[in-house]
Amino acid sequence: MSKNTPSEIKLAPSASAALPGLKSLNLQVFVMIAAIVVIMLFFTWVTDGAYLSARNISNLLRQTAITGILAVGMVFVIISAEIDLSVGSMMGLLAARRPSSTSGSAGRCRSLLW
């Protein structure tokens, strides 16, 4: 049996000691940002540059506004340690009800009453 003294034990340098800048880098966030950039470059290449036009970016923001507002509301619900599964079903119900309540001038009056 041999005894190891503290002077005999040599540890390999850790990755954080070798590269101190990478310690603060969150790999998961980096991979997600890189994936978004790759997807944006792919769609820019496929659409011949029309993907990053002002009109398309405005359209994308307009389409994601409702989902973003619902997500912000759900963040507060989740932070307060509650779970509310009715948000998705309410959004579906309102999306199905909207066309029938806004068709023509009579639809506007019905949407106020219902």
Image (cartoon, rainbow, N blue to C red):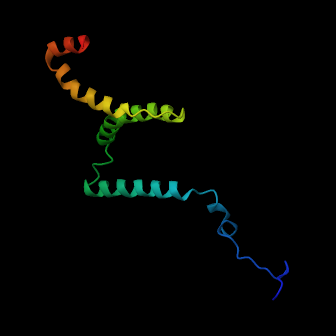
Q: Residue at x 42, y 32 (%)?
A: 84
Query: Taking 53 as reference, is 93 above or below it?
Result: above
Residue 70 or residue 54, whichever sits in front: 70
Query: Taking 26 as reference, is 55 above or below it?
Result: above
Residue 110 coordinates in the image, percent (x, y): 20, 13
Residue 22 coordinates in the image, percent (x, y): 62, 62
The image quarter in which residue 21 lies: bottom right
Give the left or right position of residue 113, taking residue 37 as reference.
left
Q: Residue at x 46, y 55 (%)?
A: 32
Residue 77 seen in the current view: yes
The image quarter in which residue 96 lies: top left
Disc tally is 0
Q: Residue at x 40, y 53 (%)?
A: 36
Residue 43 coordinates in the image, percent (x, y): 30, 54
Residue 102 seen in the current view: no
> Which quarter of the rendering shows the N terminus?
bottom right
> Which quarter of the rendering shows the C terminus?
top left
Residue 6 or residue 23, whichever sits in front: 6
Query: Taking 18 as reference, is 90 above or below it?
Result: above
Residue 77 coordinates in the image, percent (x, y): 48, 32
Q: Residue at x 34, y 34 (%)?
A: 88
Residue 44 or residue 88, whichever sits in front: 88
Q: Residue furthest front?
A: 1
The image quarter in which residue 19 lies: bottom right
